[in-house]
Amino acid sequence: MLTPDRNPIQGRNVQLMISCLCDAFFDDAAKAAVEILQQAGCQVTVPSDQTCCGQAAYTAGDWETCRQVMRHTAKVFAGPDPVVVASGSCAAALFHEAPIAFEGESDLPVMQDLARRTWELTDFLRNALGVDQWAGSLAARAVIHHGCHTRGTATREAVRTLCAGIQGLEILDVPDADQCCGFGGVFSVSHPYISTEMGRKKVTDVLSVKPDIVISADMSCLMHQQGIAGRLGSEYPIRHIAQVLRDASMGGLE
């Protein structure tokens, strides 16, 4: 597993990192993340000066910028409380990539501490708080898209476990489900034609099973897929896993 050994959870105080995309484009997903953490009994703080996890600079090989951004994040999320991230890829950047980026740096221990306190949202619900079944109902046929960054992490199993407990939610199998959708952060910028063709295949495979919603812990992948689906003239209703859990608690889609 890519996830590090965790610091023991003390109490229910958490710091929420909402991710750049949720902040800029998917504010309801961030709102839903706050709501479900509160429903799980947590006291949630959302630091206003948070920016980015540093993943884009990391994958681009810009180590200086990556470390600058990650140092700011470590400062913003200082303290003993868990850092819960509403994005599988951003969480992986902090608990897996940050310690790599800081090898040989004097502040490596700071980043290692941040890594041990960082959790993806569903991973935290299931493996820190022990939520194995999410109470609620949602009448929908759904596809779950697992972003590549969640491979080797506890997020995939956590998402499926929480969805499995929702009454009325049918999870559909998709051809080549483990294939990348082509977003890949800066990959979609540096290799746009390859990225588009990968996304086209993913969208075509998903649409072939006619889902009502497409669920993921990463809005970046879903944004990429929805954009491609739109260019194909197809509707592609996307939902962050936090929205799905919130909607299930309310008995239906908002």
Image: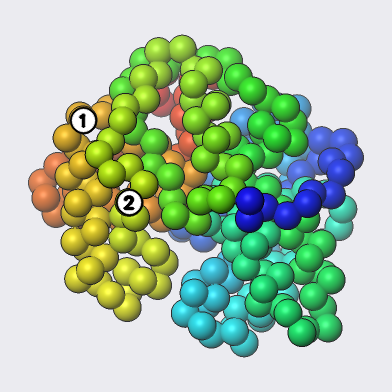
Residue 9 x/y as whole percent: 84, 41
| Type of amino acid under label 2 | Gln
Mark 2 nearby-residue class (10 Å; few <14, some 14–19, many ≥20): some
Tell me the tag on residue 179.
2
The answer to whether any part of residue 17 appears in the image is no
Is residue 75 positioned above or below 231 on the image? Answer: below
Between residue 59 and residue 75, name the one nearer to us: 59
Horizontal side, residue 78 vs residue 168: left or right: right
Between residue 81 and residue 132, name the one nearer to us: 132
Is residue 42 positioned above or below 84 on the image? Answer: above
Q: Quadrant of residue 208?
A: top left
Q: Residue at x 71, y 70 (%)?
A: 99
Mark 1 nearby-residue class (10 Å; few <14, some 14–19, many ≥20): some
Frontmost of labels 1 and 2 is 2
1 or 2: tag closer to the N-terminus: 2
| Dots 1, 2 in contact, CB < 8 A | no
The answer to whether any part of residue 84 appears in the image is yes
Q: Residue furthest left?
A: 233
Residue 32 x/y as whole percent: 55, 36
Horizontal side, residue 1 vs residue 181: left or right: right
Tell me the tag on residue 148.
none
- Quarter of the image with the C terminus in it: top left
Residue 90 x/y as whole percent: 56, 58
* Scheme by which the image is coloured: rainbow
Horizontal side, residue 137 vs residue 33: left or right: left
Between residue 187 and residue 152, name the one nearer to us: 152
Q: Residue at x 78, y 51 (%)?
A: 5
Tell me the tag on residue 209.
1
Between residue 161 and residue 14, name the one nearer to us: 161
Label 1 SS? loop
User: Distance between the Cα atoms at labels 1 and 2?
Assistant: 16 Å
Q: Residue at x 43, y 51 (%)?
A: 147
